[in-house]
Image (cartoon, helix red, strand yellow):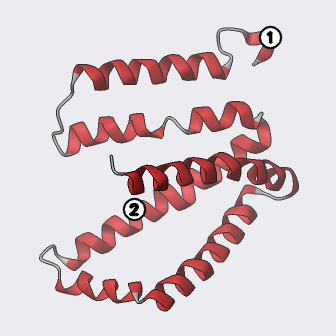
Amino acid sequence: MSKLALTYALVCVLAWGLAPVFDKFLSRELSPWAIVLMRTFVGLIMITAYAVGTGAVGELRQVWANTVPWWMIVGAVIMSALLGSLVGQVAYYYAMAGADASRVVPITSTYPLIAAVAAIAVYREPLTPHKLIGALLIVAGVVLVSGVLNPETA
């Protein structure tokens, strides 16, 4: 891994690690729907300003010039937005409103397990022993963090 890629990964970890501090506060004050609406709106403004300012918005023209049919790209964007930006975020804020952030965040951070299983099924990626062991460790972590083994602290 290059130093630049590692730096970006660590910035990501820091950002995603600190965001739940604000998410928990928001989930105490607002409904999940209001939070997702405001977060999405603010994100749209920031991303649009960046895309226009850097010229990255020009990449959208490639959608129409791509060899993949445009409707497949649009469909994938719609499904990604529906699952990731709507369903996932609303469920996350409902979870944050109803439980400790120190439990919700580790459990919701296991989404790579679902992504790995889907990639194996859809893209025929190989299921290696390391992936299988990693998946089992993720499941064990969810069981431990969730408190299902100790109902008194659940």
Q: Which residue is mark 2?
A: 79
- Quadrant of the image for the C terminus? top right
* Corner quadrant of residue 153: top right
- Which residue is nearer to you in this view: 70 or 60? 60
Residue at the right extreme of this rendering = 29
The amino acid type found where label 1 is placed reads Glu
Residue located 24% across and 84% down the image: 62
Residue 142, position as x, y percentages in the image: 56, 23
Residue located 54% across and 61% down the image: 85
Q: Which residue is mark 1?
A: 152
- Which residue is nearer to you in this view: 15 or 104? 15
Residue at the left extreme of this rendering = 67
Residue 28, position as x, y percentages in the image: 86, 50
Residue 123, position as x, y percentages in the image: 18, 45
Q: Secondary structure at mark 1?
A: helix
- Whether residue 17 sits left or right of residue 54 in the image: it is right
- Mark number for residue 113? none
- Packing grade of label 1 (10 A; few <14, some 14-19, many >=20) is few
Give the vertical position of 71 relative to 124 (above or below): below
Q: Earlier in the sequence, mark 1 or mark 2?
A: 2
**Circles 1, 2 touching at the beta carbon (< 8 Å):** no
Residue located 67% across and 67% down the image: 39
The amino acid type found where label 2 is placed reads Met
- Whether residue 128 sits left or right of residue 144 in the image: it is left
Residue 30, position as x, y percentages in the image: 83, 59
- Label 1, label 2: how many angstroms apart (C-alpha)? 39 Å
- Packing grade of label 2 (10 A; few <14, some 14-19, many >=20) is few
Q: Secondary structure at mark 2?
A: helix
* Corner quadrant of residue 87: bottom right
Residue located 17% across and 76% down the image: 69
Count up the numbered dots: 2
